[in-house]
Amino acid sequence: MRMGYRIISVDAGSPIASHNVEPMLDFIVYPDSGVQAGEETSFEEFLGKNENRQIDITLYNIATRRVRKIQIVPKKWSGNGLLGATIRLEDFANAHTRVMRVLNIYLNSPLHHAGLQPKKDYILGTEKHCLQSGEFRPIRV
């Protein structure tokens, strides 16, 4: 397993908000300290030890399957946490297989009004539920 922290949501005005992360698609793979996600030293502890210091964080995007680094300063701000993101530890190795591709959208349907595009958009879950294996069957919603 290759563990990382899936970015579930990003709070507006937070330290990480200006870094163009893509919630549900981007994973924090490891920080520059060499501490791997899921090791004994937690990511939260790593951030706490580096509060108000610039750090490098490696992100992996499951849609593009590309890795990129961002430089960020974990700090207290008006919201929760030092980064301002909700994250969850999970296996990112095959995370691209835990998505549902939108194939068709009916005119005037809720998906149509939401602006989803057939064969371009994916459903990854909601802020409270990420798709898991066994949930991948064609469904009409």
Image: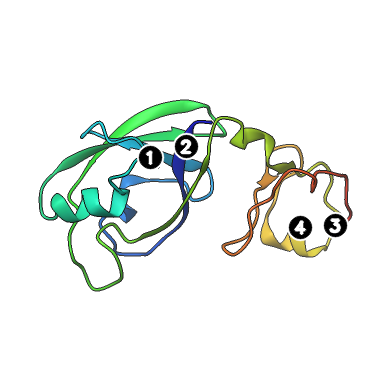
Of badges 4 and 1, nearer the viewer stands: 1
Percent of width and height locating residue 136:
80, 43
The residue tagged 2 is 3
Residue 34, position in %: x, y? 25, 31
Q: Is residue 103 left or right of residue 62?
A: right
Is the residue under label 4 in contact with that under label 3 (CB below 8 Å)?
yes
Q: Classify mark 3: helix, strand or loop.
A: loop
Q: Residue furthest top?
A: 66
Residue 6 spot, x, y in % from top left: 48, 47
Q: Residue at x 54, y 34 (%)?
A: 62
- Looking at the rendered structure, the secondary structure element under dot 1 is loop
Please tell me how crowded label 1 is: few (under 14), some (14-19), or many (20+) other residues with Cα within 10 Å: many
Q: CA distance from mark 3 to mark 1?
A: 43 Å
Q: In the rendered image, which residue does mark 3 sit on?
A: 107
- Up-down: is 23 above or below 81? above
Q: Quadrant location of the C terminus?
A: bottom right
Tags 2 and 1 touching, CB below 8 Å: yes
Name the residue type under label 4.
His
